Amino acid sequence: MQDEQELVKRAQQYNEEAFSELYELYFDKIYRYISLKIGNRIEAEDMTQLVFIKALHSISSFKWRGSPFSAWLFRIAHNLVVDHFRKKTREPVTALSDTVMATDDNPEKLAELKIDIEKLAMAVKKLTPTQQEVIALRFSGEFPIAQVAEIMGKSEGAVKALQHSAVVSLRKILNVV
Amino acid sequence: MKDPFEEILDDCIERLLLGGASIEDCLKLYPDQASALKPILETALITKRTTAIEPRPEFKAKARYQFHLAIQDLQTNKGRFFSRLRLQWATALTAVVILLLGSSGIFVAANNSIPGNPLYSVKLAIEQVQMNLTFSDAGKANLLATLADRRVDEIIQLAKIGATDKILESNNTLSNQLEMITAIITKGDNYWQDNVLSGKEEQAGAEFDDQTTRSPDAVAEPPLVDSPVPPVLGTGKIDSNFSYEDNEFSKVITTLQIDLAVNLQALEELIPSLTESVKSAINETMITIETGYSIAIDAFSE
C-alpha cells in the first residue's frame, strides 16, 4: 500500500514511469472485470482504454482516504459499465469467448473453454447486480475480500455472504444452462 | 455475526484463487464441511478458470501506445493555459477585447457568469472572437467540445438555483453545438474553410452566429484536452490504419468520450437533490448529452 501510495503521488505529478506502472498493474484486471460484466470483447477493450484515459485526466483529484487506488480505478470502471448499460444502444457483436487465444492446448479443450466462457457470461447476467459485482471483483479482479468490501462500500461479512450466494446461484444456473 | 460456513468458504476460495490450492486441499482442511463445500468450490474453480480472460496482445500493445501518447500530451499541456492558443494573433486579439472591457475584473466576472447574468453577453463576445479566429475544422470542433462541456457546467449551476427556463435554453444551445461538431466531422476537413473563408461566410457564419448569440458560454478558452488518442474509445471500431499525426479529430473524439461519461455522471449525482420541474429539465439535458455526444463520436468512425 505504501509503495502504491508513492506511485500514485508521482503519477499525480505527471510522472510517466509511475503512470505506466499503475497501468501495467491494473490493465488486465480492469479488462477482465469489464469483460465479465458486459460480455462483449470490443466494448470491453474500448471501455478499458477509456477507464485509463479518464483516470489519467482526473488523477489529480484522487485523494487517499483509506481506500486503495484500485478502489478508485474500479469505481471509474463500474461507472462506465453502468453508463454502458444505461445507453444500451449497441448489442454485443463480438463474443467474449473470441478473446481466447490459441495455445498449445488441443482444439477440443479450446472449444470447451470457449463454451464455458459463454456459459459463464450468460450465467453471470442472471445474478443480481451486487452478486455480479462480487464475482467480477473477486474472480476477475482477483481482489481479496477486504478490498472487494472497500470497493463496494460493504462490510466483509456482507461480501462473504454475497460471494456465497453468488457462487451457489451460478452453480444452479450453470447446471441448467 | 459471522457465518462460520461463509468464513470457511471464503478461506477456501482465497486459497483456490490466490494460493494455488486444489479443491482436495481445501476439503482436507475442513473435512466436516467437505460435502457442502465440494460443489460450491467446483463452481468457484470453473468461474476462476473462465474469468481468467487475457486481453489480446495486439490490443494491449496498441492501448499501451495510445496511453503513453496521452501521458506525453498531458505533460506537454500541463499548466499551459494561454499557450494552448494555437494562433498567436488570436491571443493578441482576445487580449484587445479584454482591454476594451476596461479591466480584467470584468473579464473574470464574465468568465464566471451564467445565463441571466448581465455580463453574460461579454462572455459571448469573447467566445465569438475565439471561434472566428480558429480556422481549422478540428480546432473548431475541439473548441466547440470545450464550450459544450462548459455549457453542462452552467446547467449544473442553473439547476442548483432552480432556473428551469434557463436550463432549457442552455440545453438547446448545447444540442446545437454538439450538432455543429457532428456537422464539421461529417463534412470533412475543409468544411469550415470552404464555407467561412472562401466567400460563403455569410451562410456559414450565420449558422454559427445563431448558435453563439443564444449560447450561455463561458469565456472562450482553448480546448482542454489535446491528447492525440485515436478514435477507438467507445466506438467499437478500431481503425488499424489510423495515423495519429494526420488526424486532429482524434483529440476531439477523446474529449467527447470523456465528457460524455463525466457529464452524465455529474448530472446523475445532481438529480436526487432537485425539485420535479428542475429534474425534468435535467433529464432532457441528459438525453441531449447521450444522443448529441454519441452521434458526434459515431460520426467520426463512419
Image (tube, helix red, strand yellow):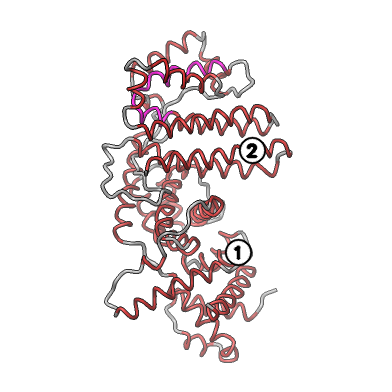
| Dominant SS type (magenta) | helix
Which quarter of the picture shows residue B278? top right
Question: As shown in the figure, which amino acid type bears the numbered disc 1?
Answer: Thr
Residue under numbered circle 2: B282
Q: Quadrant of the N terminus of chain B?
A: bottom right
In contact (CB < 8 Å): disc 1 and disc 2: no
> Closer to the camera: disc 1 or disc 2?
2
Mark 1 Cα-neighbour bin, 10 Å: few <14, some 14–19, many ≥20: some
Question: As shown in the figure, which amino acid type bears the numbered disc 2?
Answer: Ile
Which quarter of the picture shows residue A110? bottom left
Where does the image place residue A156, in percent across and percent down from the top left?
Answer: 61, 67
Q: Please state the extent of the stretch shown in magenta in the rendering.
A: B121-143
Q: Chain of mark 2?
A: B
SS at badge 1: helix
Where does the image place residue B68, in percent across and percent down from the top left?
Answer: 32, 47
Q: Which mark is residue A130?
A: 1
